[in-house]
């Protein structure tokens, strides 16, 4: 009489566990990459939305909102409330002022910062020291958004990608701010 074996052998179980582990690792990498891409898309969308709101403000007022120095929710820009980063923009032109998904107010990273010329003829809105970015190559993914005054190059109005640390929109007369 032979006894029929039921169940799985230890080797079969180990193979299944190894396959599941490999698939889980691949899934985690894909999930992390997807999250980073989503944060990147939000940053671009936020900056475009602020840029459009600023243009609407200028259309109504014939100048951009004027600030005395850098304005930001982060310490580098005075730790102002979100509605006061760009005076007069919320709630008429923006329902609420957006925030970078990884903003660190005390560490001054991933901060939206607003700067204007003294007469309101120009402005710059930047996302400063983006936490997701490891090096210049990350900033170079969308070269048109590089802030030339914060890219490490010699010309503060032309991006060369030497060592960028901010993305943004700006008027030409505010490029060096």
Image: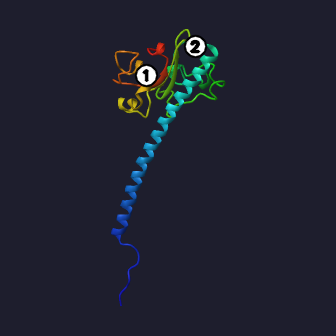
Q: How many labels does the image show?
A: 2
Name the one closer to the observer, 63 or 10: 63
Give the percent coordinates (x, y) of residue 125. Answer: 51, 22
Classify mark 1: residues with Cα within 10 Å, few (<14), some (14-19) or many (20+): many
**In the rendered structure, which disc, 2 or 1, sits on the residue that comes first in sequence?**
2
Q: Give how far apart the Cα atoms at labels 2 and 1 are.
A: 20 Å
Name the one closer to the observer, 111 or 173: 173
Residue 85 in view of the camera: no
Residue 52 in view of the camera: yes
The residue lying at 50 percent from left, 27 percent from top is: 111
Q: Is mark 2 on a helix, strand or loop?
A: loop
Q: Mark 2 points at which residue?
A: 66
The N terminus: image quadrant? bottom left
Residue 176 location, quadrant = top left
Determine the residue located farthest toward the right in the rendered image. Answer: 92
Query: From the viewer's perspective, is 168 left or right of 10?
Result: right
Q: Mark 1 points at which residue?
A: 147
Give the percent coordinates (x, y) of residue 27. Answer: 42, 51
Determine the residue located farthest toward the front in the rendered image. Answer: 59
Residue 64 location, quadrant = top right
Q: Is mark 1 on a helix, strand or loop?
A: loop
Give the percent coordinates (x, y) of residue 150. Answer: 41, 20
């Amino acid at each position: 009489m032979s006894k029929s074996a039921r169940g799985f052998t230890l080797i079969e179980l180990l193979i299944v566990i190894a396959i599941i582990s490999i698939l889980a690792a691949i899934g985690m990498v894909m999930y992390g990459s997807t999250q980073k891409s989503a944060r990147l898309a939000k940053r671009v969308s936020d900056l475009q939305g602020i840029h459009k709101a600023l243009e609407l403000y200028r259309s109504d007022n014939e100048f951009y909102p004027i600030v005395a120095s850098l304005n930001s929710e982060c310490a580098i820009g005075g730790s102002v409330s979100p509605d006061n980063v760009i005076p007069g923009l919320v709630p008429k032109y923006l329902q609420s002022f957006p925030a970078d998904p990884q903003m660190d107010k005390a560490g001054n990273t991933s901060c939206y910062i607003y700067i204007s010329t003294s007469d309101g003829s120009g402005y710059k809105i930047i996302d400063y020291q983006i936490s997701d970015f490891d090096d210049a190559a990350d900033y170079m993914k969308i070269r048109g958004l590089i802030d030339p005054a914060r890219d490490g190059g010699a010309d503060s109005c032309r991006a060369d990608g030497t060592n960028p640390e901010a993305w943004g929109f700006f008027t030409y007369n505010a490029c060096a701010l």
